[in-house]
Every structure is written in C-alpha cells, then in structure tokens.
C-alpha cells in the first residue's frame, strides 16, 4: 500500500504557499478536530457495464475520499466515519483555515517515503 502526501498550493501575499490538505479539514469525531495527514493509494476499481470495463473513479469523479468508499483513487488512511450518519462522524471544511471562495489552488500529490 502506497502512502501519499497531498498538499494544497496557492498564492498568499504574492508568494506561493504549500500546506497539507489536512490543515483545511476538521474532524467531527475527535475533540481536538485534528485530521491525520495519512492518505493511501486505494486505486479505485473496474466494473463491467454493457461488456465494457469502466474505471469507477472516472464515472464518480472522486479522486480523494474522505470516508470509506470504493471509488476514489486516494483515501484517508485512518478510520473515519461517514458524515451523513451523524454530526459526530467524518470531517468537514475547517472554517478557520479555509481559503476564500475563488482562490486558485493546485493539488500536489507525492509518494511518502518511510512507510
């Protein structure tokens, strides 16, 4: 299983800044709100439709999964609840660290070594 780092790159004050994507999320499960910076390559999966092999991530559009699901290419590498099942499960955007609407960002994916 490959561990992946996901960073968000954006301009702030005329300079490029990179931050782990986990800094823009908050846990609804943990009292401290911390989201682990632990992502894994899940790979999505293929399924058959009218005798064609279809890559699930292509049809769902899901690249990064924040809760257990089969389709995303990358998933949070630690157990996380499904936010639709209760206010104390899953994650949400961290209102304190969220970038203004319309901010141009680039996601940077890199394999983490040492795992």
Image (spheres, grey):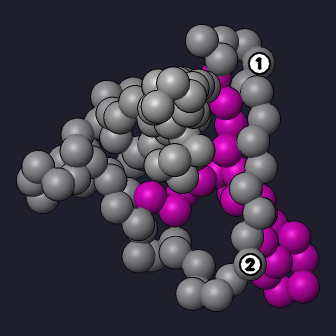
Judge whether residue 75 can be spotted in this image: no
User: Is 36 in front, or is 106?
Assistant: 106
| Residue at 9% over, 53% down | 86
Above or below, 24 against 105 in this view is above
Q: Is residue 18 magenta?
A: yes
Could you say which disc has been placed on residue 24 in the image?
none
Q: Is residue 74 magenta?
A: no
Secondary structure of residue under mark 1? loop
Q: Quadrant of residue 10?
A: bottom right
Q: For marks 2 and 1, give the one nearer the viewer.
A: 2
| Residue at 11% over, 49% down | 85
Query: Real-space Cα distance between discs 2 and 1?
Result: 28 Å
User: Is 70 in front, or is 50?
Assistant: 50
Residue 11 image position (x, y, % from top left): 82, 77
- Of the 4 image quadrants, the one containing the N terminus is top right
Q: Which residue position holds label 1?
A: 113
User: Is 18 in front, or is 105?
Assistant: 105
Q: In the rendered picture of this protein, how many numbered marks are placed on residues? A: 2
Label whose residue precedes the other's in the sequence (2 or 1): 2
Q: Which residues are magenta?
A: 3-25
Residue 71 image position (x, y, % from top left): 45, 35
Q: Which residue position holds label 2?
A: 104
């Amino acid at each position: 299983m490959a561990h992946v780092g996901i960073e968000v790159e954006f301009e702030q004050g005329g300079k490029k800044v990179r931050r782990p994507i986990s800094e823009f999320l908050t846990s609804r499960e943990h009292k401290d709100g911390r989201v682990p910076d632990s992502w894994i390559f899940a790979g999505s999966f293929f399924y058959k439709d009218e005798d064609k092999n279809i890559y699930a991530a292509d049809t769902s559009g899901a690249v990064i999964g924040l809760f257990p699901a089969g389709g995303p290419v990358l998933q949070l590498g630690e157990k996380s609840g499904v936010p639709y099942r209760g206010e104390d499960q899953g994650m949400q955007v961290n209102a304190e660290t969220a970038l203004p609407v319309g901010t141009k960002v680039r996601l940077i994916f890199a394999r983490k070594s040492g795992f």
